[in-house]
């Protein structure tokens, strides 16, 4: 049941960000962070694919942090640990 709730949360992210915004040739879409879902929602370490996507999406993090529907997830303790392990600094927005 827990796995399905994580999938539901991710589906909500997708619905909230149907439109995309281009920032420095990066497509800002929370769906791009799909490889990080397990690391964001559990104690699993981030995969290489997760870290690569997190680095790619770094220009978009302010957009995610300023979205009240995403802030709680993107700014969660697990997300901060993942960013740290991936050596991705979180911006001050």
Image: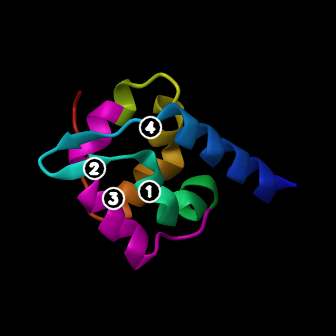
Q: Who comes first in sequence, dot 4 or dot 3?
A: 3
Mark 2 residue element: strand
Write down the residue under mark 4.
75
Residue assigned mark 3? 54
The residue where tag 2 is placed is 27
Residue bearing the label numbered 1: 33
Query: Where residue 20 sits: x, y (%)?
Result: 34, 40
Residue at 26% across / 60% down in the picture?
Answer: 55
Q: Is residue 35 magenta?
A: no
Q: Is residue 5 shown above or below 15?
A: below
Q: Quadrant of the N terminus?
A: bottom right
What percent of the width, then of the height, locates residue 83? 36, 56
Where disc 3 sits, the SS reads helix
Q: Residues within 10 Å of mark 4 (few under 14, many from 20)?
A: some
User: Dot 1, how many residues are within 10 Å of its Cα: few (below 14), some (14-19), or many (20+)?
Assistant: some
Position of 17 compared to 43: left or right?
A: left
Which comes before the other along the chain, label 3 or label 2? 2
Q: CA distance from mark 3 to mark 2?
A: 12 Å
User: Which of these two is toward me, 82 or 32?
Assistant: 32
Q: Is 53 left or right of 7, judged from the image as shown? A: left
- Describe residue 74's horizontal placement relative to residue 7 as left or right: left
What segment is highlighted magenta in the picture?
Answer: 43-63
Contact between labelled residues 1 and 2, with CB atoms less than 8 Å apart: no
Q: Nearer the viewer, mark 2 or mark 1?
A: 2
Vertical order, 53 against 62 (above or below): below
* Tags 4 and 3 touching, CB below 8 Å: no
């Amino acid at each position: 049941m827990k796995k399905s709730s994580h999938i539901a949360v991710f589906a909500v992210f997708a619905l909230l960000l149907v439109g995309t915004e281009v920032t420095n040739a990066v497509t800002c879409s929370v769906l791009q962070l799909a490889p990080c879902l397990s690391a964001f929602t559990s104690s699993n370490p981030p995969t290489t694919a997760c870290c690569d996507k997190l680095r790619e999406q770094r220009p978009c993090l302010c957009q995610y942090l300023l979205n009240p529907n995403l802030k709680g997830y993107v700014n969660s303790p697990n997300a901060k640990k993942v960013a740290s392990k991936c050596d991705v600094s979180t911006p001050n927005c």
